[in-house]
Amino acid sequence: MSALAELLREWMPAQRWFGSKGREWADVTEDGFFLDRSEPVLSVHLVRVTYTDGGGDTYLVPISWRDAYVEELGSAHIGTVTGDGRQSHAYDGMRDRDATTPWLIHLVQASTVGPMHFHPAGVAYIPEGVPGDIVSTEQSNTSLVYGSEAIFKLFRRLEPGLNPDVEIHDALRRTENPHIAPLLGHIEIDDPDPSKPPATVAMLQTFVPNASDGWRLATASVRDLYAEGDLHADEVGGDFAADSERLGTATASVHLDMARVLPTEPADPDWYGGVARQMGERLDAAIEIVPQLAEHAEGIRQIYAAVADSTEPVVRQRVHGDLHLGQVLRTATGWIVLDFEGEPARPLASRRELDSPLRDVAGMLRSFDYAARHMLVEQPDDPQRAYRAQEWAERNRAAFCTGYSEASGLDPCGGSPLLRAFEADKAVYECVYEARNRPHWLMIPLNSLSRLTSRD
């Protein structure tokens, strides 16, 4: 194992974007090339991690190299490597501001550097030569903002094939949908296996300035409600329902345009059975990680069984796949929907499959529940707050559905067994996520499953 691979083995598991926390590593290898040889030097590495359970992942890790330790970059320091009688300091290349300019320079030039290919969309100005500032709320990816013009998203875990975020934004660009940020370009890297397609490395979009994150707005509304001990959700100055209704309208608009420019097909009986079976398999796997799910398992399986027997008409289409309040921005003119890559933990092929728009609706409904109840984590035994959280969630869920229905002609919350199953499936996913990342938040999805399984 190389010295750099040893460093990465120590450093990567602590990064937020590393998606296999808790799995035991069997081996790690890395292959890199230089993207820029100025100061600091920037190299890009494909890091292949294999696990003792037999699985494996490939991650993209840009590294900036400096001759001396830089105090201001201490939090981005990966370690030191000695070679040719000298010591080089390795830093996370996405957090070293001086190392962020080459990405857009190469994109403007439509370069090919080693196995990496840069594809500008050719539709708008790209701020060449401007350094990028890290977005602190990184999750499975890492983003940089370049001035006030563009935002660059690096996909950390790679799979062969075009990322749905690039594919869907490119398709929606033709519709001029007002609820997306236009695509400015993307980057691919060749797979070491020439029989496989390149993997999407990154994408560049128009930056949306003066926008407010949906999660922050929603949770601020909840705090306003909690501060007013004797008022209902519709009486508080920070009522969010009007925004929720407009968000429902925006979501329906995006769904309608995706159906216009990307494939669709009616669901057949086999699809319903397949959905129910996959949900059941995910539940089985989740119980192994979160034993508390077992007490809800029978009720959850009954919800899934109703899907297998369902005859409700569904036109399958491309969907967002991971829609929640953290994936939307409110601007002065309306809502913008972000991040069409789906759940990063799912295989790329499954994220590109046709699905019901109700999966996205369920994701947003779950997000309203999260926003309403996240402050209960600190006061789980406060019945007054629990009542007010339920009232806020129901009001905003209903408003979202009203906006969606008026824009699409489809009532998404009209007692659909499929919607209920999607909500349960999402809550099961949330249980696994919280158990691995925020165990003290596990009560939120578990309580939601209790409510879902207790409905008549």
Image (cartoon, rainbow, N blue to C red):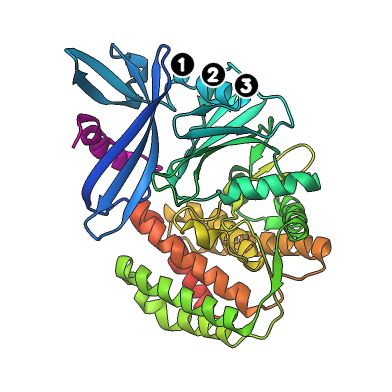
N-terminal-most mark, 3 or 1: 1
Crowd around label 2: few <14 · some 14–19 · many ≥20 (10 Å)? many
Q: Amino acid at mark 1?
A: Asp
In percent of width and height, residue 13 lies at: 29, 43
N-terminal-most mark, 1 or 2: 1
Q: Is residue 143 left or right of residue 2?
A: right
Helix, strand or loop at label 3? It is loop
Q: Is residue 77 above or below residue 216?
A: above
Residue 454 visible here: no
User: At x 59% / y 78%, what residue is drawn?
Assistant: 271
Which sits in the foreground, 272 or 47?
A: 47
Q: Is residue 17 above or below residue 304?
A: above
Residue lying furthest front: 194
Numbered mark located on residue 147 in the image: 3
Return the residue at label 1: 98
Helix, strand or loop at label 1? It is helix
Indicate the quadrant containing the C terminus: top left, top right, bottom left or bottom right. Answer: bottom right
User: At x 80% / y 48%, what residue is drawn?
Assistant: 175
Q: Is residue 269 left or right of residue 54?
A: right
Return the residue at label 2: 131
Quadrant of residue 115 within the rendered picture? top left
Which sits in the foreground, 236 or 312?
A: 312
Which sits in the foreground, 111 or 68?
A: 111
Residue lying furthest bottom: 309
Q: Which residues are magenta?
A: 1-17
Indicate the quadrant containing the N terminus: top left, top right, bottom left or bottom right. Answer: top left
In percent of width and height, residue 4 lies at: 24, 30
Residue 73 visible here: yes
Q: CA distance from mark 3 to mark 2?
A: 8 Å
Secondary structure, magenta segment, majority class: helix
- 33 is within the stretch colored magenta: no
In percent of width and height, residue 108 lies at: 62, 24
